[in-house]
Image: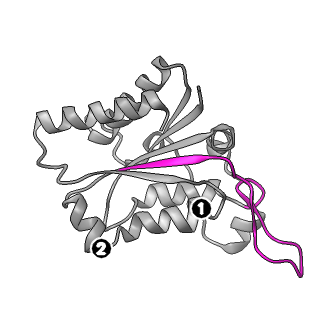
Amino acid sequence: MSRRILVLVGHPDPSPDRLCRALASAYAESAERAGHTVREIDLALLNFPMLRTTQEFEHGTIPASLQEAAEAVVWAEHLVFVFPLWLGTMPALLKAFLEQVMRPGTAFAYPQKGEGFAVSLLRGRSARLVVTMGMSAPVYRIWFLSHGIAGMRRGILNFVGVKPVRETLFGMAAGASDAKRAKWIGQMRVLGQRGL
């Protein structure tokens, strides 16, 4: 079954040599060949401000430079985020993007007075977090409890209704051999083909 897939590259460095871009490209190309409809967004190529106030978050508008990206998030049935682990979590650029796009009215709605919880507006969507890191992936999972990724999954994606959120972690990326990187790219092709 074909899916509408949005692939977001969250590496702040626009260099085409970054592993994150190779992983994202392998996924997207394989997904398209398998019949999925794919859109791609590279955050390093976008220019947008950071949110600075609650008023702006709740009542401001999504910047014009991110309108297309916000529409793509709503359009997608499956979101694929590809980014490096920086200080245990996503880079600030990706967090700033999510703060701009996952706004009230787009990703969730505040409850009416006297009612319970916020209403998730992105239900029915799934996601995959593809994360490169300098440490061993098992160490990040076991010792650090995947804290940065868990926060993204629960505090952002699950909050707006995106679930399940699966993870693919590539550890010790900086020193990885060409053979290891080729294996990882192969894994991304398989995931892309399956739309997972």
- Amino acid carrying label 2: it is Phe
Q: Secondary structure at mark 1?
A: helix
Q: Position of residue 169 (x, y in %)?
A: 31, 52
Q: Position of residue 10 (x, y in %)?
A: 42, 48
Q: Residue at x 69, y 59 (%)?
A: 103
Query: Please, is residue 62 above or below residue 25 in the view?
Result: below
- Of 135 and 62, nearer the camera is 135
Residue 138 appears left or right of 44: left
Query: Please, is residue 75 above or below residue 49 in the view?
Result: above
Q: Residue furthest right?
A: 113
Query: Where is the N terminus found, in terms of image quarters?
Result: top right
According to the image, label 1 marks what residue? 158
Q: Residue at x 69, y 66 (%)?
A: 57
Q: Crowding at label 1, few (<14), some or many (≥20) Cα neighbours within 10 Å? A: many
Residue 138 appears left or right of 94: left
According to the image, label 2 marks what residue? 144
Q: Marks 2 and 1, how far apart in space?
A: 20 Å
Q: Residue at x 63, y 43 (%)?
A: 73
Q: Which residues are magenta?
A: 104-130
